[in-house]
Image: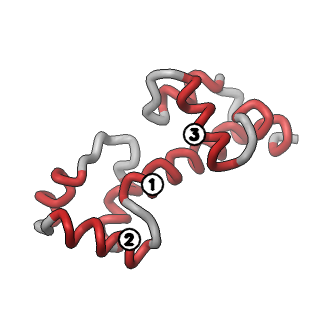
Amino acid sequence: MLQIRDYIDEHLYDSHTIDGLCRQFNLNREKLQSGFKAQLGTTVHAYMVKMRMQRAAKRLVDTDDSIKAIALDSGYKKQRSFNKTFKTIFQLTPAAYRKIHGE
């Protein structure tokens, strides 16, 4: 499972599916999902979302890139969806996070 996590980390912005990961790592769906959850305490999808948001948060603080550009680069087609997910994880909008943590 750690090898799969490392692969996801290295290819975070690629489009991953459970079936694709199962084929790549020669595991059945149940084994992948239950093993990932048991070892990492989260689902594959939730892990990817969390890691993308953590990278986006770092970029909000470290760069002057627009929130829209960061949202698009994070895999979101609409900034509104990005903002909603970001706020769910950090309890702040991306703009508020940048303002608070960028100072």
Q: If the image is split into quadrants, where does the C terminus sit?
A: top right
Against 72, residue 57 (above or below) is below
Residue 3 in picture, x, y percent from top left: 30, 70
Total numbered labels placed on residues in the image: 3
Residue 77 in picture, x, y percent from top left: 44, 23
As measured in the structure, the alpha-carbon distance from the residue carrying label 1 to the one carrying label 2 is 10 Å
User: Pointer 3: what residue?
Assistant: 85
Residue 37's label in the rendered image is 2
Amino acid carrying label 2: it is Lys
Specify whether 101 is left or right of 74.
Answer: right
Asked where in the image residue 9 lies, by quadrant, the reply is bottom left
Q: Residue at x 20, y 68 (%)?
A: 30
Q: Are marks 1 and 3 in contact (CB under 8 Å)?
A: no
Q: What element carries label 2?
A: helix
Q: Are marks 3 and 2 in contact (CB under 8 Å)?
A: no
Q: Of callouts 1 and 2, which one flags the residue occurring earlier in the amino acid sequence?
A: 2
Amino acid carrying label 3: it is Thr
User: Pointer 1: what residue?
Assistant: 46
Specify whether 33 is left or right of 20.
Answer: right
Residue 50 in picture, x, y percent from top left: 52, 52
Against 26, residue 55 (above or below) is above
As measured in the structure, the alpha-carbon distance from the residue carrying label 3 to the one carrying label 2 is 21 Å
Q: Of callouts 3 and 2, which one flags the residue occurring earlier in the amino acid sequence?
A: 2
Q: Residue at x 64, y 26 (%)?
A: 67
